[in-house]
Image (cartoon, rainbow, N blue to C red):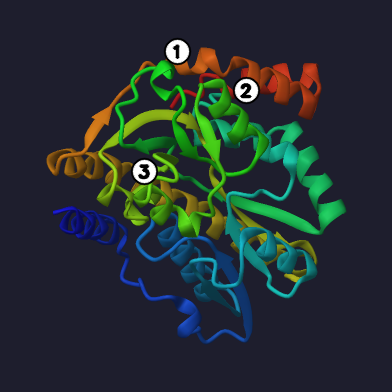
Amino acid sequence: MKKSILLLLTSIVTLAGCNGNSEVESEAPGSGEYDVSFSTWANPGEPAFDGMLRFEEIIEEETEYNINIFPGNQLGATVEQMEQVMMGSIEMMSSGDPGLMEIEMLSLPYLMDSNEHWKNVLESDIGQEWEDQMRENQGLINIGILPRGPRIVSSNVEIETPEDMAGLKIRAPQRDYYVETFRALGASPTPVDFGELYSAIDTGIVTAQENPLETIVAGGFMEIQSDISLTNHMYKPAFITVNNEFFESLSEEDREVFYDAALEAEEVTTQLLEEEEEETLQTLEDNGTTIIEPDLEAFEEQTQSVRDELGVETWGEERYNEIVEMGKEDLGE
């Protein structure tokens, strides 16, 4: 039964994301004169990957460049891909690592209310300052974001309040803001490589994990887990990161095409996420998964110290308070 659920959910993701160009383009480059390597964690069928396919389509239609996408971390772990982009051995990548800790810490729990609030900060004077810093110090530039769903928890216990997380062995990425978030919630964050996570859950090394819904489905975790709690504890988009030397070598017209293509990739990804979320949750529930909508205010209050301490440590008190306001601002959505 669980295997058939996974196949059904995967079909939902793939069909919703289909745009007539679902093959991995690195196997069939376009007719442009120059090749560009684009590495990513994402796999075909994920909304972000379909956004990348739209990016590729626009670039190949309007410039002389071929975009060769390498999905599923084919070219190495995120840190290895980042090093390759910095060195120029590949031109661009997409991951949840923006290349600068000051940007990444916008992932602090309940700091940003949405992907749009991330953009609200990134498009401000503060964001421009970070972009300049990254370009100068690391030779990188972010030309856009690819939204991902809010991070939620899948487990084999019902999680309605922070108290339900007491002692829970949860896999969390080994970043301070992840680890401290789940410690503040009373859980026991445990390091497990993502590639080994399914086995770790299946054998009881951990009993819970957290990721966006689309990643939980793609990873097949609901074959071996019974509950999803919509904790929405972090928004963390992916970034389209480019080697700055390569980007500056483009004509002004081509740079504008790259920016426009990144924006359209974001729009495609956003639309697919919105279309798939409700249907995916309903399919999971119909097939026996317990979907829990917890009291988010209680989770937000319990992680206040994590936001305050790491936020002030990263940006200083004045800037932290400014970012807090921007993360909750009414954007008229």
Residue bearing the label numbered 3: 213
Earlier in the chain: of badge 2 and badge 1, it is: 1
Q: Amino acid at mark 1?
A: Ala
Q: Residue furthest right?
A: 136
Which image quadrant for residue 89?
bottom right
> What quarter of the picture does the C terminus occupy?
top left
Q: Which is closer to the viewer, label 2 or label 1?
A: 1
Which is closer to the viewer, label 2 or label 3?
Answer: 3
- 19 vs 148: above or below: below
> Residue at point 52% right, 61% down?
41
Q: Reading the chain from its start, which is encountered first: label 2 or label 3? A: 3
Residue 286, how many percent across, how many down? Answer: 12, 40
Query: On the picture, is 2 further left or further right than 277?
Result: left
Identified at 50% across, 17% down, the residue is 300
* Residue pointed to by mark 1: 298
Disc 3 crowd rating (10 Å Cα; few below 14, some 14-19, many 20+) is: many
Inspect the image, locate mark 2, and give the three-letter code of the amino acid beneath it.
Met
What residue is drawn where x is 57% and y is 84%? 32
Image: 273 above or below 312: below
Give the Cα distance between marks 2 and 1: 21 Å
Mark 2 — residue? Answer: 326
Instruction: Note whether residue 326 is visible.
Output: yes
Q: CA distance from mark 2 to mark 3?
A: 25 Å
Q: Position of residue 176 (x, y in %)?
A: 67, 35
